[in-house]
Amino acid sequence: MKCARYLAALVVAGWAMLPAPAHAAAYGIYEQGAAVLGMGGAGTASVHDPSALFFNPAAMTRLTGTQVQGGGSLLMPFTSFAGISPYPGYGTTEEMEAQKFPLPTFYLTHHYGEKSALGIGVNSPFGLGVDWKNPDTFSGRYIVTKADLRVINASASAAYLVNPKLSIAFGGNLTWAKVALHNRSFTPAPGGGGGQFEVAKVDLESDYTPGYGWNLALSLVPNKSWTFGATYRSKVLVFAHGNADFTQIQTVNATVNAAVAAQLPPDQPVNTVLRFPATWSGGVAWHWGESWTVEGDVNYTEWSLFEDLPIYFEKTPASNERIVEEYDNTLRGTFGVEHRLPAFTYRFGYYYEQAAAPTESVSPILPDTGRNGGTLGLGMGFGKDKRLTIDLYELALFAQHRWTEDVNRDNFNGHYRTYINSSGLTVAYRW
Amino acid sequence: MKRMHRVIGILLAAAAFAGCSKIKPITAPKAVSGRASFSVVAALGANLTAGFQSGGLVDRHQTRSYVSLFAQQVGARPLDVPTINGDGIPPLLRIRRLLPPPTIIDSIGRNFGAPTNFAIPTAYHNMAVPGALVSDVNDTSTYYAAARANPYFGLIARGQGSLGLQVTTHLNPPATFIAFQFGQIEVLGPATKGLGTPLLTGVQFAALLKAALDTIAVRAPAAKVAVFNVPDITLYPFFTTLPPTLLDATGNILRDANGNPRFVLGPNNVRLTANDYILLRASTLLASGYGYPLGTYSFLSGAPVPGNGIGLADSMVLSSSEALGLAAEIRRYNTIIDTTTLRHDYVRVDIDGLFRTAATTGFNWHGTTYTSKFVTGGLFSLDGVSPNDIMHAFICNRLIEAVNMRYGSTIPFLDPTQYGTLTSSRGGAPRREEAGLPPLVLSSGMMLRDAFPWRDPASP
């Protein structure tokens, strides 16, 4: 249990620095367990460690005794942008700050009697970290200079072995989320000529606010060669409350400065709605002999829930804003292989996921795109009966080159290129 | 075993670093002209195409008319434009005062400009003439008639033949692409005088438009033509800035004891209705108490002025029925433009739709919403009917969009924010419009006489 406490401490420390980049479609993060990620994220059917709490809670009935797993991923995204006409124009390039996001996970499962299992866990299944370089000159600063979405999700599930072949599970999620959005405000020159002045920094930041969801899962093992799994995680809505700060930027024109000072909204409370979509997952695993597992998964995420990001100002409702998103539901296909050797286990996998953002919504806030991911994984057991296991994975995610096709809602058009590297490690122990 | 570890290590390192380079800047693709040629761009039209702004014609706006912007964007031969220096002809309106309210707009103290390339031996590429009608494309008989007394024809047409003749035969090399914009003055001219009858009926306009385009097709068979349709008159701030309701000192609507709005007195001292339009040039009259019933006050001058109980003249008001009549006529014009354009391999440009967007949702561009609101909306110049530089950029983009679709060309759009200026007349310090009081436009009689010189009733 000393090991469990150590892992828990590491995980808590990780969450303290949590802003995370979107890694699955939109702002979803699927990096929740190193062993499954080694197989490209294909684990709905065959997951066999405590990360089952995320990938398929019904599979907890196959985990013996008490098991604890902690660790996480280090995500390193890199996004750059090249503009086209009319705005910001050909030849313009921008890039985000190189960032490193630790993404901790912690799971604890316990098997009760012959048929039941319980699990609790903490992870971060959603997140976003956008930080454009040179915010004072970034050509899209009227849209965003920096955006963070931080999510901490605590889940608890109970699994029951209905018969030797079928397990089911039900659980709940308590999701805390906070969001921050920073941009610059422009105003037309009051003389009517259409010229613009950059007049204010706008900083919106909410507090951590909870939302609630639930999940269902089943696991079917008809014979030694095949395993089937399915999960459903419900949507979560978070009604976040925070503050809006407006900081005036002085222009060279004193008259404009005076006018802006008189018209700038006061700092004030602000409210918004954060939407985290429901996800359906289904997987089939084929076990070849004792040492090979091959799995294919399909995930369906109801991103159409993300219609908009409304911003309600309490003191100046005339300033209310609705950032239209109108995302589409997405499919993700995953394929993974695990080969268990006496000394170690290696894994590899691949996945493809559709973009959730329609072309009109591809913006500096979230340049969402379809993506291909290739993963490699390694697992090793230590000690008596290999009770201590360490799993590693490396994922190279090649987001598709995406361009806005001249239809971006904010008239900020160009091509985005994103690459994300993710490495992860989990340490598990079973009693 | 060691080999496997080494392989895994190499794969991990390769995956970690592959593909993480920054995107390269995109160079502008070479514009493809498609089925059209843009080597020589020319224009026929009226105020809009001439680059008329803030009640006058001046080089700094002429060279930023949508035609000039389009020619630059397609890399056409530099346009010869009948440029006028100084403060323009007539001197442009400017913002005299923005604070304290009301905003005061006039042209006092500005000087007449002069033509700078009057002696050019060929025709101008931009042969648009403020106040021109579609009949002027082929007809020279009314240019210099006393009834019209339009000085711009002397400056631009210069007695060298009809506008259409000059554009199609006097340019060397000849025009390969012609912007054609008529119909605006035919309806806007009467409307700005409070009249509801267009200068040309739909039937007359159809015949003249057909004749004009057929003539161009014969004289310049290789040229493509972009034909602009006609915006509804209620889309101009000239008609929408002054509400028909009485306003208090803060610009709010005055209401009676029952909460109903109180309306300005119109012709024959009959109260206007919510659907009537007060012309922008009535602002000085309203500010001095005209239109306000006895016992009420006008605050438009910035101080309370007792109402004199005298209703506004008919020439200061466009009634709802007149506006509806003109709107119906404009729809006929636009239908005719659609069908006539289709008869040739020409393209129709929908600026009626563009103006409608400006007047309703506005344009969200670079974090700013531009609208048709007078002065502060950022799209119209100080005469209330002429687009400013940035609106010309939006019009140019609409032209590019239409041309690209019709001819398969790939002309890049331009960034309108590059054409924004501090004030509509590019001079003077900008100031904030306080309260809701509409601007006070002085010199408006002169402004309109020069904008629509062919028929200007006596100033009030």
Image (tube, coloured by chain):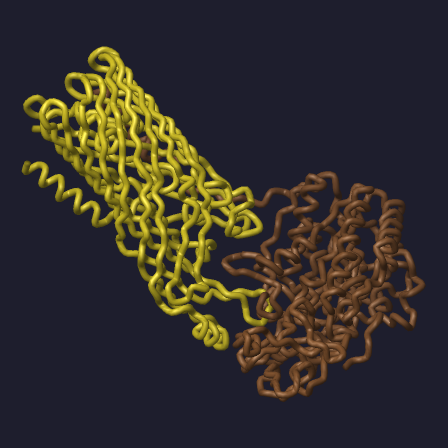
Number of marks: 0
Q: Residue at x 18, y 26 (%)?
A: A160
Q: Nearer the viewer, residue A369 or B369?
A: B369
Q: Residue at x 90, y 56 (%)?
A: B138
In the shown orientation, is residue B60 left or right of residue A275?
Answer: right
Residue A397, percent from left and from top: 36, 34
Q: Nearer the viewer, residue B60 or B106?
A: B106
In the shown orientation, is residue B98 left or right of residue B162?
Answer: left
Which picture quadrant has residue B352?
bottom right
- The hue used for chain B is brown
| Chain in yellow (letter) | A
Residue sitting at the far right:
B141
Residue sitting at the far top:
A289
Residue A268, percent from left and from top: 35, 66
In the image, residue B60 sits, relative to residue A289, either above or below, namely below
Residue A151, percent from left and from top: 28, 46
In the image, residue B57 sits, relative to residue B136, either above or below, namely below
| Residue B224 visible in rendering | no
Residue B328, percent from left and from top: 76, 56
Q: Nearer the viewer, residue B433 or A185?
A: B433
Q: Residue at x 69, y 85 (%)?
A: B309
Which picture quadrant has residue B376?
bottom right
| Residue A426 visible in rendering | yes
Q: Residue at x 20, y 13 (%)?
A: A290
**Quadrant where the image shows the N terminus of chain A:** top left
**Quadrant where the image shows the C terminus of chain A:** top left
Q: Nearer the viewer, residue B77 or B388?
A: B388
